[in-house]
Amino acid sequence: MKISTKLIHSAGEKFDRTGAISTPIYLSATYAHEKLGESRGFDYSRLENPTRMALENTMAALEGGVKSYAFSSGMAATACLFETLKSGDHIISSHDIYGGTRRFFDSILTKRNIAVSYVDTSDLEAIKSAVRHNTKIIFIETPSNPMMIVSDVAKIAPIAKKSGAKLVVDNTFLTPYFMRPLELGADVVMHSATKYLGGHNDCMGGVLTFKCAGFADEIGEIYKSAGGCLSAFDSWLILRGIKTLGIRMDKISLNAMKIAGWLKSCKFITKVNYVGLGEHPQYEVSKAQASGFGGMISFEVADEKMVPKILENVKIIYFAESLGGVESLITYPLVQTHAAVPEEDLNHLGINKKLMRLSVGIEDADDLIADLAQAMEG
């Protein structure tokens, strides 16, 4: 079955006999038992919920994993994953990652005496040099946020395996429609389901999907104990979003390619970071491991005074954080998504006063270009 069909039909087992096409929303907090020692498979919704289970089954099928867990947010998923570490452990992380993830690493993990090495994970030698005897996880975000750096999952996987570390890939930007990291050798895939999976800026969620049952079971113990599970209603919203993921991602990618090309020719723009541009440093890597380039673009304006002008004058595009919805959103990473990143690291990455990030939606590309043009000229 091809991925576009799996998006529609991967919810799996139906939990009632009505024949409902849409998975029912099970709002029950608890479940009755017929007799002592017998369960219908559900006991308490923090542990398992039929609607959430349908989402988890769907994500496992889409990513090619053995098990998925759905969380109340992407950061809840991230936090649960790193609960497997103990004092003295070490992780390697992409140096260009979502600011919230960086804040979690720097403010939470370091307090637990867990060391983090930030490296350019598009550089295999840099990863090899960063490996220590106590390295437990290699965490990559590809394409990265906001500089759109691509890491070669298939080539990083053997490095992780040799060192005894788990390879974790944040697949939020590309989704399983365009890339399936477990097939490339990753051990765990993470999603902020708030973004493309939900796709409509109306819910929050996070998902972890596992290649190995043993590690999934270890996370499962933490999951049911810490209680960061996704609600039934948000599970249903994300399931609904997944059904249109393919057509949304196709449209978004076409729009992004057209807009990136226009930005390259715009007199107000000095640099465009989009994976689908042939001159992107990891263009060939992306083509080899993914079937599409996604909808995320970052770009630099010629003069930092253009930033507030654009943010205040866009009319169709919303000035808002987040990404991945049907609506196009523009963000200023320096003071929004990456405010928690140290200035020295921001400068090294190129996240400067001129950088803006655009999450392309499904509107008409020409309308989006016209909106950017009038905001710059206005």
Image: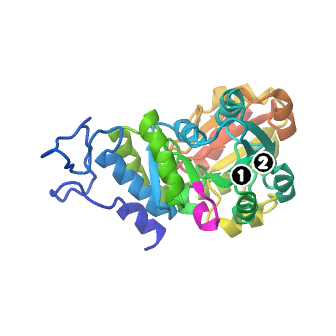
Residue 158, quarter of the rendered image: bottom right
Task: Count up the numbered dots.
Answer: 2
Q: Nearer the viewer, residue 261 or 125?
A: 125
Label located before the other in sequence (2 or 1): 1
- Cα gap from disc 2 to disc 1, whole angstroms: 7 Å
Identify residue for label 1: 260
Name, please, the residue furthest toward the bottom. Answer: 1
Element type where label 1 sits in the image = helix
- Labelled disc at residue 272: 2
Amino acid type for the residue under numbered disc 1:
Ala
Q: Check contact, mark 2 vs mark 1: CB within 8 A.
A: yes
- Residue 145 in the image, given as x and y percentages of width and height: 70, 43
Residue 203, quarter of the rendered image: top left
Taking the spot 15% from the left edge, 56% from the top edge, the residue there is 18
- Residue 306 in the image, given as x and y percentages of width and height: 77, 30
* In the image, residue 225 lies in the stretch drawn in magenta: no
- Residue 7 in the image, given as x and y percentages of width and height: 42, 61
- Residue 221 in the image, given as x and y percentages of width and height: 46, 43
Taking the spot 42% from the left edge, 66% from the top edge, the residue there is 6
